[in-house]
Image: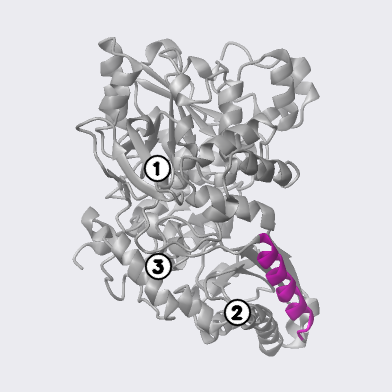
């Protein structure tokens, strides 16, 4: 870089200036005059959150392996710098070159969480790019969105030129080639968008329209021009072992949320929990070869100097070669004095041998997610866990030396009763009792057990069997949290149990964004203009402004949240083919209402539709 975009005076006046100076170890610097495409890759949240996201590191590495592309990183400025940039008219810049984002060919957003939607507008605004796609000219970057939120992109459709549906390693090269061709031929923005809409996985919202019924539901969703697909099919990496993986990830100067080496061992999940969007949209399950993961582990530790390595997947204990991988990592980590983190564990499927091997490395708390307190509710959500599984898993953990356990649950699940809720407290108490029954008093070197029970509020998401379900009101959520708290306080081991719950206001708004349609976009725009930004951060969330803005726009929050959808309703996201079919999801919804369990993908193929991709666990079934 020639010079920093921010002066020393500004950098010394803001919190954590290292967020904005770039030049970290392993960042990619190229000659901007020797590339054809400049791509600004934005995580619309603060630097520490964005730099912890593996997907951003993967695509940053993937794009930069092309000689004709330079991908740089952009994050939402924190509120202190946001204020200064507006006052001093400083345009938002990318970290590597410190050049203005407006001068790039593409501005790509990874959309991981609905509550970051106003941050998208903050980034566009500070970049001096028109907020609405229809107001942009050939001088503005192509604004593209990807990530899990684009499985219903409609609430933010007006702000984007393109959406990429699926895994980014598959179709970006064809998109870049098309862009170069159109640029060479002098074609305008509209021409490029029309041609891009023909690339599999690319959705151009301006080329589609929607009409509504009198009751506010969708009547019809349709393309405005010929030769573009009516349905957009998600893109899937078919060979995970040979897929691009960052051998030299960028190492931040400052501590970030996930400050560690990350090994992605597989994508997808075999379990089919009915509340879980990721478990549906990332199907089918595809594993990375264990030998390749061993190579990655060594090279990543050498390239970063991190002191912890973590396994990443939706359900790590379902990885078929987990024990071999852990055995290898134990040896490497002991030799290097590196800690191992094992997230995403199923308490029923984590073997004693793995527990015993990991116990020799520095311990942290173990996290398990029963999700519901009663067996009836676990059957409704298809969690596939019994109380016996949970207590047996806790027993193995305590026997191997762990004394701190985090348990995650949800409140507001379909068909939930107070008896189900009180089961959360009862289960926590039984886990505590299991500790005292397992570990003799004289062996409790680290003190008695600590159980942290956390409840989030259930939010129905697209492409799940619960996409038809009504969501609780704020008052219902808070009442259920109160019931949970009281039930925990009445348990014998209540002093060993700490209880946390999520904020209800934020959950309601997330529920609107999750299942919203294009009409919600006007609310997002107006709320941003009134000062809403960083809504994912409780200190900046302004619920009153959001609720007032919905009223101003004539939209009902309840229409998007508490209303149960009829089975024949057209959803805003029905134009996306995510692999799992709507008929399969309907069948799962009906099974949930009858408290019926569906076997996991390895035990039985349930015909979800993901076999069409011809890869992973679906092959040969």
Give the mark nearer the N terminus: 3 vs 1: 1
Q: Is residue 269 above or below residue 355?
A: above
Q: Which residue is mark 1?
A: 245
Write the start and end of the magenta stretch as one range.
474-491
Residue 504 vs residue 86, the one in the foreground: 504
Check residue 412 for magenta coloring.
no
The quadrant where residue 17 appears: top right
Q: Residue at x 37, y 41 (%)?
A: 211
Give the mark nearer the N terminus: 2 vs 3: 3
Give the x, y percent position of residue 84.
Answer: 74, 20
Q: Residue at x 49, y 21 (%)?
A: 29
Residue 272, numbered label: 3
Disc 2 or disc 3, which is closer to the eye? 2
Badge 2: how crowded within 10 Å, few (<14), some, or many (20+)? some
The quadrant where residue 382 appears: bottom left
Kindly check if marks 1 and 2 are in contact, taking CB atoms under 8 A apart as contact: no
Residue 42 vs residue 444, the one in the foreground: 42
Q: Which residue is mark 2?
A: 417
Asked if one can make out residue 252 in the rendered structure from this viewpoint, the answer is yes
- Residue 110 lies left or right of residue 502; in this view the side is left
Quadrant for the N terminus in the image: top right
Quadrant for the C terminus in the image: bottom left
Disc 1 or disc 2, which is closer to the eye? 2
Give the mark nearer the N terminus: 1 vs 2: 1
- Residue 85 lies left or right of residue 235; in this view the side is right
């Amino acid at each position: 870089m020639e010079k920093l975009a921010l002066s020393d005076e500004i950098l010394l006046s803001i919190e954590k200036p290292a967020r904005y100076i770039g030049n970290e170890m392993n960042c990619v610097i190229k000659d901007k005059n020797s590339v054809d495409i400049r791509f600004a890759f934005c995580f619309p949240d603060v630097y520490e959150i964005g730099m912890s996201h593996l997907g951003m590191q993967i695509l940053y590495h993937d794009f930069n392996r092309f000689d004709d592309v330079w991908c740089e990183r952009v994050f939402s400025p924190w509120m202190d710098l946001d204020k200064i940039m507006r006052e001093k008219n400083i345009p938002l810049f990318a970290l590597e070159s410190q050049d203005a984002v407006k001068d790039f060919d593409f501005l790509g957003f990874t959309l991981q969480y609905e509550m970051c939607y106003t941050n998208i507008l903050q980034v566009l605004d500070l970049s001096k790019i028109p907020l609405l796609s229809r107001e942009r000219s050939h001088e503005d970057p192509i604004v593209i969105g990807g990530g899990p939120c684009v499985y219903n992109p409609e609430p933010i459709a007006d702000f984007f030129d393109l959406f990429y549906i699926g895994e980014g390693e598959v179709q970006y090269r064809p998109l870049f080639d098309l862009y170069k061709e159109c640029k060479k031929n002098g074609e305008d923005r509209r021409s490029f968008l029309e041609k891009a809409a023909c690339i599999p996985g690319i959705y151009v919202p301006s080329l589609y329209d929607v009409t509504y019924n009198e009751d506010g539901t969708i009547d019809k969703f349709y393309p405005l021009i010929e030769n573009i697909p009516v349905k957009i099919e998600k893109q899937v990496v078919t060979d995970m072992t040979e897929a691009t993986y960052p051998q030299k990830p960028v190492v931040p100067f400052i501590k970030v949320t996930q400050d560690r080496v990350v090994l992605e061992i597989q994508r997808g999940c075999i379990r089919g929990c009915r509340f879980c969007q990721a478990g549906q949209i990332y199907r089918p399950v595809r594993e990375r070869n264990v030998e390749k993961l061993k190579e990655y582990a060594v090279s990543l530790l050498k390239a970063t100097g991190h002191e912890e390595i973590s396994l990443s997947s939706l359900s790590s204990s379902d990885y078929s070669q987990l024990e071999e991988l852990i055995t290898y990592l134990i040896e490497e980590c002991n030799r290097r004095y590196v800690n191992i983190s094992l997230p995403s564990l199923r308490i029923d499927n984590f073997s004693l041998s793995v527990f015993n091997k990991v116990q020799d490395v520095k311990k942290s708390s173990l996290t398990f997610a029963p999700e519901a307190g009663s067996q009836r509710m676990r059957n409704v959500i298809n969690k596939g866990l019994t109380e016996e599984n949970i207590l047996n898993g806790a027993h193995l953990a305590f026997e191997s030396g762990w004394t701190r356990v985090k348990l995650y649950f949800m409140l507001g699940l379909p068909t939930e009763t107070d008896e189900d809720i009180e089961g959360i407290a009862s289960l926590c108490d039984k886990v505590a009792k299991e500790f005292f029954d397992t570990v003799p008093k004289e062996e409790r070197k680290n003190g008695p057990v600590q159980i942290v029970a956390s409840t989030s509020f259930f939010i129905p998401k697209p492409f799940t069997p619960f996409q038809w379900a009504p969501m609780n009101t704020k008052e219902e959520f808070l009442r259920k949290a109160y019931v949970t708290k009281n039930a925990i306080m009445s348990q014998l081991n209540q002093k060993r149990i700490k209880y946390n719950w999520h904020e209800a206001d934020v959950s309601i708004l997330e529920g609107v964004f999750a299942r919203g349609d294009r009409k919600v976009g006007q609310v997002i725009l107006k709320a941003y203009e009134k000062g809403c930004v960083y809504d994912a951060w409780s200190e900046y969330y302004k619920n009153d402004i959001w609720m007032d803005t919905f009223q101003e726009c004539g939209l009902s929050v309840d229409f998007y949240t508490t209303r149960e959808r009829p089975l024949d309703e057209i959803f805003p996201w029905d134009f996306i083919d995510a692999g799992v079919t709507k008929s399969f999801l309907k069948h799962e919804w009906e099974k949930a209402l009858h408290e019926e369990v569906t076997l996991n993908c390895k035990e039985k193929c349930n015909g979800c539709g993901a076999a069409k991709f011809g890869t992973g666990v679906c092959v040969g079934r």
